[in-house]
């Protein structure tokens, strides 16, 4: 089973700041098979990024994904109030299609 | 419009059986994997397993293998998640989710909240 480790656990930032979230895999992934999601309390999760860097429909360009191999990054260039949430990475390289444990982005 | 409409919240006792449903519409049901994802109270997302409705091949995370069964009825475009014997630790929100044409879960049901308590 591929383990995804996200860091940090919590990121305390102010609106307008840059958020950098990390997702490290226990083995090399094909970049086509790494996705990121946003989850807000009381809502359903939302797909942000697939294929490591491809934005899903309707996702603003301040949200970007990068990385390859075992190290992947989600960057939000300028935090808006609606960006404060929990973020998860997920791999589809090998079943089971595991999620990371999540990074909470909170208002400082 | 793609929609995944899940059955309502359930309150059950340990040892009881249950089947929850996920009615799909707005797309070709047999062409996309349906996945089930668990979120326990205060915890993160966990991938449980998936099914190809047109096949119906299914596979499971080892953490859930043997405890749940995923199935689908393509005649009514509905997927199911079922338990034969519930445990208190099954208390959680369960989401059915479509995997898109690429590697990402693009459409999510609103979730079914399951509470298992004696």
Image (cartoon, rainbow, N blue to C red):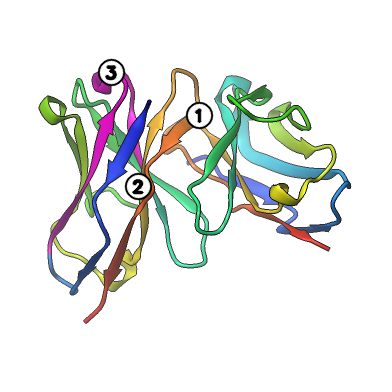
Q: CA distance from mark 2 to mark 3?
A: 29 Å
Residue shown at the point (78%, 39%) measured from the top left: A76
Quickly name the residue at label 2.
B62
Q: Which mark is residue B104?
A: 1
What secondary structure is found at the residue carrying circle 1? loop
Q: Are marks 3 and 1 on the same chain?
A: yes
Is B6 situated left or right of A102 in this image?
left
Q: Which residues are magenta?
A: B17-36
Q: Quadrant of residue B30?
A: top left
Counting residues from the start of the chain, the first of labels 3 and 1 encountered is 3
Q: Which mark is residue B28?
A: 3
Question: Which marked residue is nearer to the observer: mark 1 or mark 2?
Answer: 1
Residue B106, percent from left and from top: 47, 31
Residue shown at the point (75%, 27%) measured from the top left: A61
Q: CA distance from mark 3 to mark 1?
A: 17 Å
Residue A71, percent from left and from top: 72, 34
Is A87 situated left or right of B50 in this image?
right
Give the crowd class for mark 1: few <14, some 14-19, many >=20 residues within 10 Å: many
Q: Which mark is residue A108?
A: none
């Amino acid at each position: 089973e591929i383990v995804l480790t996200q860091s940090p656990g919590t990121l305390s930032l102010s609106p307008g700041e840059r958020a950098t979230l990390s997702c490290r895999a226990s083995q090399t992934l094909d970049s086509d098979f790494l996705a990121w999601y946003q989850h807000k309390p009381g809502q359903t999760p939302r797909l942000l990024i697939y294929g490591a860097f491809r934005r899903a429909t309707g996702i603003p360009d301040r949200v970007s994904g990068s990385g390859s191999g075992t190290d992947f990054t989600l960057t939000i260039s300028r935090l808006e109030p609606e960006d404060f949430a929990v973020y998860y990475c997920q791999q589809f390289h090998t079943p089971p299609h595991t999620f990371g444990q999540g990074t909470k982005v909170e208002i400082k | 419009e793609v929609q995944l409409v899940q059955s309502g919240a359930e309150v059950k006792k340990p040892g009881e059986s249950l089947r929850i449903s996920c009615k799909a519409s707005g797309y070709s049901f047999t062409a996309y994997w349906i996945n089930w994802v668990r979120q326990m109270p205060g915890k993160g997302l966990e991938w449980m397993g998936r099914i190809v409705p047109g096949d119906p091949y299914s596979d499971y995370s080892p953490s859930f293998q043997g405890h749940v069964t995923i199935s689908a009825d393509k005649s009514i475009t509905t997927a199911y998640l079922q338990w034969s014997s519930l445990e208190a630790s099954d208390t959680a929100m369960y989401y059915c989710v479509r995997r898109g044409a690429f590697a990402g879960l693009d459409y999510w049901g609103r979730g079914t909240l399951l509470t298992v308590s004696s």
